[in-house]
């Protein structure tokens, strides 16, 4: 795919996310929309994987540490061919493989179970260490939120991955500056995330998390780093693609009928129109 | 009398009975399991020698992972390694693991169904002078309540070695509880051990004593004293607290009509809790439960503390005499 095609693919995934959340009636909105470009780049360009053979031993692995953003992963996996797109409408429903937070044993390809924050980086490090012991060339990617960096387990894992020189590990921090109670710098200031990781012994790259070229070249550069794991701090816009959601922490999301719930039907129509018209730049094929 | 099929140590009731800490048995078992299975790895949180991972670390340095003083990291790194095909054993003091990292164990090991073996050493009041912070008493309750978790509390060092080897080839999450102090070695290499069966060490008709860990020895000594008074106690080693062998325990309760439990842990949620739940469901009988009764420990010698909290044969004997009057 060309990078332009990848951008369009990311937009289609954003539409899927809005539709899934409206159908589910609960779930997080802003984070998944903000991560659509990164997920598209990973699944359609960066990672070695086989959608029809999710357990293929030679695959690269993706650990989603901030499990609440899983709608973007489900939508991307469906578009990549892991399961039918029609299954997306079962999100958060009884009996669904698409649990509200990802459960590995229910859906092949999820790699792990997550939701409680802070434990993904260490699991990714454990995978990277085990793959290296076995002489595998597979790489491990881990996506974390930025609010999630409040968790102590993250920094235990960061110290560990650097100590063990896990060059086959790439962590992508979704730096969208929001968490449930408000802006990250007001709730619990993170300060200079790049310096923090550098001080822990990581190679640090900072990018615009919506620039497809930047995402792909940062992931490729990480493969060439020796002696250190790499962290990509991806600056993203929460709610990316939907004007009234962008930058507003209230759309971080929780349950229906409270601030941050998924969009109601009329709001969803506005959101889908915006995504389909690329913010009014093109005519929608659906309307 | 003691069942000869159990092949217990012939000198177990003599003062000269061999004594060894059950963590030593774990160290031997881990090494033996590792010889046979190259996928076994061991992770430790800055307590390699005292949790007896040192022989493994020396023999298999490339399969030993030091994580430093970071118990949340300890179990989550292990979960990741298990997801990539390894069989990790992780050790620390029980107060810290599974004491500190319970949610990580719940989500990344139990719900996630990863093949991680959690080894909690230095459990119980017999840790002694270190005091209450380091005397883990709630670990059985914390681990027993988790779906998919197996919980094993070996009676001695020989059984700890056996349990380690069995758990190494058992697929799924497990917790192995160990103690710091030496205790009598009552089983032998020939003694049976199974994850699905409690062992009836001594047959009796008047009451049943269900015990785990170091209290199994105390129960056997108490049974001998009771026998001299004409009271025949059946003694069951419930080393596998979960899944509890309901069939064996209920059958014994039906036969004797009274059940006493004994453990070096909080009775609430511990072995006493597990046996009470099972009997309430299947065959309620008068019960009495020995262990920590909603109390923390404190500093002292192991012997002083075991005595203070009633974790000794004379206390078991006295409780048994009271209990049979309620039949």
Image: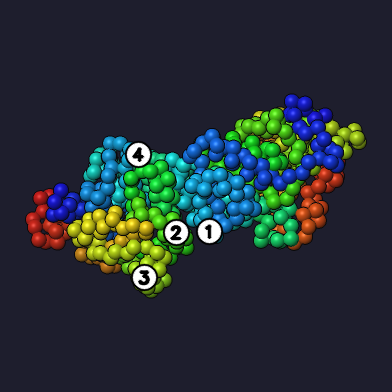
Chain under disc 4: A
Chain under disc 1: B
Q: Is residue B4 visible?
A: yes
Q: Mark 4 and mark 3: span between their CA atoms?
A: 35 Å
Q: Same chain for labels 4 and 1? Say yes or no.
A: no
Going from N to C along the chain, the mark reached first, 2 or 4, is 4
**Classed neighbour count for the residue bearing mark 1: other residues with Cα under 10 Å, few (<14), some (14–19), many (≥20):** some
Q: Same chain for labels 2 and 1? Say yes or no.
A: no
Percent across and percent down for residue A29 are: 30, 58
**Classed neighbour count for the residue bearing mark 3: other residues with Cα under 10 Å, few (<14), some (14–19), many (≥20):** few
**Numbered-mark total:** 4
Disc ID at residue A57:
4
Q: Secondary structure at mark 1?
A: loop
Q: Label 2, on which residue? A: A163
Q: Mark 3 and mark 2: span between their CA atoms?
A: 17 Å
Between A165 and B203, the one nearer to me in the picture: A165
Q: Label 3, on which residue? A: A195
Between A188 and A220, the one nearer to me in the picture: A220
Q: Mark 2 and mark 4: span between their CA atoms?
A: 26 Å
Question: In the image, is B178 to the left or to the right of A140?
Answer: right
Q: Mark 2 and mark 1: span between their CA atoms?
A: 10 Å
Q: Are marks 3 and 1 in contact (CB under 8 Å)?
A: no
Going from N to C along the chain, the mark reached first, 3 or 2, is 2
Q: Are marks 2 and 1 in contact (CB under 8 Å)?
A: yes
Q: Secondary structure at mark 4?
A: loop
Q: Label 1, on which residue? A: B68
Q: Mark 3 and mark 1: span between their CA atoms?
A: 23 Å
Q: Mark 4 and mark 1: span between their CA atoms?
A: 30 Å
Percent across and percent down for residue A47 are: 27, 48
């Amino acid at each position: 795919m060309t990078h332009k095609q990848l951008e369009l693919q990311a937009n289609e995934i954003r539409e899927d996310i809005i539709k899934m959340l409206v159908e589910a009636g609960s779930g997080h909105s802003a984070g998944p929309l903000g991560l659509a470009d990164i997920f598209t780049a990973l699944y359609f360009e960066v990672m070695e994987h086989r959608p029809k053979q999710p357990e293929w031993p030679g695959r690269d692995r993706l650990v989603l540490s901030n499990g609440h953003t899983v709608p973007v992963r489900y939508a991307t996996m469906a578009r990549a061919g892991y399961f039918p797109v029609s299954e997306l409408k079962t999100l958060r429903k009884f009996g669904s493989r698409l649990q509200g937070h990802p459960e590995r044993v229910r859906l092949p390809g999820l790699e792990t179970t997550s939701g409680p924050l802070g434990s993904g980086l260490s699991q990714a490090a454990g995978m990277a260490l085990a793959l290296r012991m076995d002489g595998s060339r597979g790489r491990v990617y881990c996506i974390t939120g930025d609010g999630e960096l409040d968790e102590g387990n993250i920094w235990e894992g960061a110290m560990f991955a650097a100590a063990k020189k896990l060059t086959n590990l790439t962590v992508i921090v979704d730096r969208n500056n929001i968490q449930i109670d408000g802006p990250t710098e007001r709730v619990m200031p993170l300060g200079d995330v790049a310096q923090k990781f550098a001080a822990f012994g990581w190679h640090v790259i900072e990018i615009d998390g919506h620039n497809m070229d930047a995402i792909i070249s940062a992931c490729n550069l990480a493969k060439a780093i020796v002696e250190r794991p790499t962290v990509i701090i991806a600056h993203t816009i929460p709610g990316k693609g939907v004007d009234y959601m962008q930058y507003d922490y209230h759309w971080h999301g929780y349950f229906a009928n409270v601030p941050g719930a998924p969009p109601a039907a009329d709001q969803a129509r506005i959101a889908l129109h915006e995504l389909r018209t690329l913010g009014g730049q093109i005519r929608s094929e659906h309307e | 009398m003691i069942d000869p099929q159990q092949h217990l140590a012939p000198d177990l009731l003599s003062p000269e009975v061999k004594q060894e800490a059950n963590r030593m048995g774990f160290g031997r078992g881990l090494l033996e399991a590792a010889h046979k299975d190259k996928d076994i790895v061991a992770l430790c949180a800055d307590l390699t020698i005292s949790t007896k991972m040192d022989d493994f670390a020396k023999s298999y340095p490339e399969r030993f992972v030091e994580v430093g003083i970071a118990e949340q990291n300890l179990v989550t790194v292990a979960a990741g390694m298990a997801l990539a095909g390894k069989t990790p054993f992780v050790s620390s003091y029980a107060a810290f693991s599974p004491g500190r990292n319970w949610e990580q164990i719940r989500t990344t090991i139990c719900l996630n169904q990863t093949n991680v073996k959690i080894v909690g050493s230095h459990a119980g009041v017999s840790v002694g002078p270190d005091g209450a912070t380091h005397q883990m008493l709630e670990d059985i309750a914390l681990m027993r309540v988790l779906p998919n978790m197996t919980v094993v509390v070996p009676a001695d060092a020989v059984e700890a070695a056996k349990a380690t080897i069995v758990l190494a080839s058992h697929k799924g999450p497990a917790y192995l509880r160990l103690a710091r102090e030496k205790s009598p070695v009552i089983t032998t290499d020939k003694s049976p051990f199974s994850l699905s069966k409690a062992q009836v060490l001594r047959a009796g008709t008047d009451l049943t004593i269900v015990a785990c860990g170091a209290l199994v020895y105390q129960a056997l000594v108490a049974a001998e004293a009771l026998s001299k008074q004409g009271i025949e106690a059946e003694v069951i080693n419930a080393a596998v607290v979960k899944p509890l062998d309901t069939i064996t325990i209920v059958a014994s309760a039906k036969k004797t009509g009274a059940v006493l439990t004994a453990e070096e842990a909080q009775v609430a949620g511990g072995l006493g809790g597990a046996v009470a739940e099972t009997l309430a469901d299947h065959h309620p009988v008068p019960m009495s439960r020995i262990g920590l009764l909603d109390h923390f420990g404190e500093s002292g010698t192991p012997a002083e503390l075991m005595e203070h909290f009633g974790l000794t044969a004379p206390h078991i004997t006295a409780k048994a005499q009271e209990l049979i009057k309620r039949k």
